[in-house]
Amino acid sequence: MRALQTAATGMMAQELNVQVISNNIANVRTTGYKRQTVHFQDLLYENFRRAGSATSETTQVPAGTFVGSGVKTVSTGRIMSQGNLTSTEKQYDLAIRGEGFFRVRMPDGRTTYTRDGSFDLDSQGQLVTRDGYQVEPGITIPNNATSVNINAQGSVEVMLPGQTAPQVLGQIQLVRFVNKVGLESIGDNLYIETAASGQPIEGFGGGEGFGNLQQNYLEEGNVQAVTELSSLIAAQRAYEMNSKVITAADQMMSATSAMFRG
């Protein structure tokens, strides 16, 4: 019976949906995390009688007869909306209010991108991520700096002993993408560009199309716990309904088989 296969596709789709929701809930406190959502499409239809087919020389069928074969998952895209900013009182923590990503250089030479601005200094005084990956372009803070200020445009200024004016060390660069949903997640709060995302567009905080930097702040994940729990309940109910379809189809097949045996 076709209903068995159709319901099975529904159960597999909702199983994936629950996996995505569980990942969102698990990352509810992950800095810069962007929640995922699942998109579905219906599968092919078998037409038993096409709409508009002729029933006589002057009449035609107003509505056809066709049966679908289930559902498929087409994407698990990310919702790239702004997360709330929270104060950390750490001078190297940075949040982006608006569009943009930080550039991060990996040990193998690859360039990755992140919204997680929880930075620190390595043994050489370079600005790095929590995993020790270098933020680009490289910024090195002198070990005798008495204070560090990073303004909304990403300009890094330090006060050094014996100086009355701050010294500018460089400017933190941001990048954005035409299709940021097309970025590929590789874990550790990092993304890499793909053919779908397009090439990175470079700029600085406050520039056209770019957000501002906020020192001493981090961007929270954009997961809404209440929304995720509601989605989880809906996915669970959809899974249960598909399982009931399989049970009903099995009972109908058993009854039909018993009739033939009788």
Image (cartoon, rainbow, N blue to C red):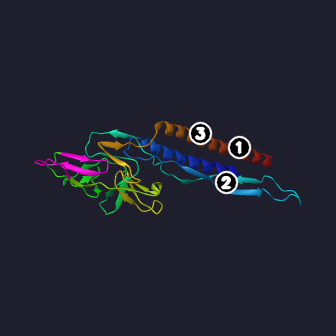
* C-alpha separation, residue under disc 3 versus residue under disc 1: 21 Å
Q: Residue at x 30, y 39 (%)?
A: 88
Q: Nearer the viewer, mark 1 or mark 2?
A: 2
**Residue, far right:** 57
User: Is 146 above or below relative to 66?
Assistant: above
203 sits left or right of 6 in the view: left
Mark earlier in primary sequence (3, 2) = 2
Give residue 253's position: percent from left, percent from top. 73, 47
Cβ atoms under marks 3 and 1 closer than 8 Å: no
Circle 2 residue: 69
What amino acid is found at the position of numbered circle 3 in the picture?
Arg
Give residue 56's position: percent from left, percent from top. 89, 59
* C-alpha separation, residue under disc 1 versus residue under disc 2: 20 Å
What amino acid is found at the position of numbered circle 2 in the picture?
Ser
Mark earlier in primary sequence (3, 1) = 3
Circle 1 residue: 251
**Residue, far left:** 162
Give residue 250's position: percent from left, percent from top. 69, 46
Q: Nearer the viewer, mark 3 or mark 1?
A: 3
Check residue 25 for magenta coloring: no
Q: Classify residue 233 by image quadrant.
A: top right
Q: Secondary structure at mark 3?
A: helix
110 sits left or right of 41 in the view: left
Magenta residue span? 147-167
User: Is 60 above or below relative to 97?
Assistant: below
Q: Label 1: few (<14), some or many (≥20) within 10 Å? A: few
**Residue, far top:** 226
Can you tell which mark lies on residue 173?
none
Can you tell which mark lies on residue 237?
3
Check residue 149 for magenta coloring: yes
What amino acid is found at the position of numbered circle 1 in the picture?
Gln
